[in-house]
Amino acid sequence: MSESKDDVKKAARLREARAAILDQLGHVIVGQQGTVEEVLIALFARGHCLLQGVPGLAKTLLVTSLARILDLQSSRVQFTPDLMPSDVTGTEILQEDPVTRARSLRFVKGPVFANFVLADEINRTPPKTQSALLQAMQEGQVTAGAQTLALPRPFFVMATQNPIEQEGTYPLPEAQLDRFFLQSLLNYPSLAEERRIVTETTGASAPELKPVLTAAEVLDLQDLVRRVPVPGPVVDMAVKLVRATRPKDEFASDQVKQWVSWGASPRASQALVLGAKAHALLEGRLVASAEDIVRVAKPVLRHRVVLNYQAEAEGVQTDDLIARLLDAVA
């Protein structure tokens, strides 16, 4: 009973922190409320986030600002075609003792050893370097030579990619995309939002961001998300929704069989339930519900469902297909 009361207090703390984070971000980010919410869902569900949008939509600013607000150690990696895996994870260097002249190898940690890692334009680097980061995301550790080093906790990766340029890019394979908890899409701002952006960013004053949570509090709240109860029917809904994306599954519709090459993996079912838990807590509720599954379905599934050539020829969008599946499963 005491643990339950303690969890209720922590849930209230998360709700207060959410309001404070949104208030702080509002000083530097105009609009993009849906993306901000999805980033917070991924963070507290202990996942990683992939941001996709055209240049100039404040993807990088969102990441760096959130790291400052959460008082986390952050780093940025600008992915380029010549970037090597050691540029991300670190490298061993040969050093000599000035007294004994003995030589030994010393590992110099790379930018991945931070709480908050921004992988800027991740699709501009070859798969070999992409996999170095994604291995760290999956296992929470880096292997260098004969030693394995744990990454700091919390560990959160936000990767950005530009969808409009194809030359000089290396699209992430579907198996690697699956490592991202969710994919958030950034859209152009409205007329009023763009006017506010221009007004606030062309002046002389610069907003100061204040920390809202510490690393220890983020870890505690991530553990709290895991303890959120989920009713059996809600779990069934998540599982059936994911299975409905697989063309050869019994739950697959005729449209899925016609348009989908590969459906989502069980990792998507896990992400749906965890995302629903995080969303419920952020909204001030202590139990996940079907509406939480609906809220996180598109960002969780859109990068995990592979459409075939027929779907592309007919102009079928992944989000539209997910919406139809939600109606059918609900």
Image (spheres, rainbow, N blue to C red):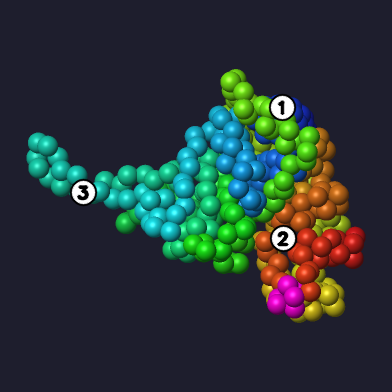
In front: 148, or 157? Answer: 157
Q: Circle 2: is it few (<14), some (14-19), or many (20+) Cα within 10 Å?
A: many
Q: CA distance from mark 2 to mark 3?
A: 45 Å
Which residue: 69% across, 48% down?
186
How far apart in space, not on screen, are marks 2 and 1 (Cα)?
A: 29 Å
Residue at position x 52%, y 48% in the image: 120
Residue 21 coordinates in the image, percent (x, y): 68, 30
Amino acid marked by disc 3: Leu
Residue highlighted by disc 1 = 23
* Amino acid on which the number 1 mark rests in the picture: Asp
Q: Position of residue 258 (x, y in %)?
A: 79, 79
Q: Tell me if residue 329 can be seen.
A: no
* Mark 3 element type: strand
- Mark nearest the camera among 1 and 3 is 1
Q: Which secondary structure dominates the residues rendered in magenta? A: helix
At horizontal 58% and vertical 47% (from top left) the residue drawn is 158
Which label belongs to residue 302? 2
Q: Give the mark nearer the N terminus: 2 vs 1.
A: 1
Q: Is residue 258 above or below residue 8?
A: below
Q: Is residue 182 left or right of residue 87?
A: right
* In the displayed structure image, the side of residue 112 where residue 215 appears, left or right: right
Q: Which residues are magenta?
A: 308-313
Amino acid type at circle 2 is Arg
Is the residue under label 3 in contact with that under label 1 (CB below 8 Å)? no
- Mark 2 and mark 3 lie on one chain; the one further toward the N terminus is 3
- Please give the name of the residue rendered at 80% of the width and 50% of the height, measured from the top-left corner: 295
In the rendered image, the quadrant that contains the C terminus is: bottom right
- Label 1, label 3: how far apart the Cα atoms are: 48 Å
* Front residue of 216 and 164: 164
Q: What crowding class fits label 3: few (fewer than 14 Cα within 10 Å), some (14-19), or many (20 or more)?
A: few
Asked if one can make out residue 310 in the rendered structure from this viewpoint, the answer is yes
Q: Residue 42: x and y, percent? A: 66, 46
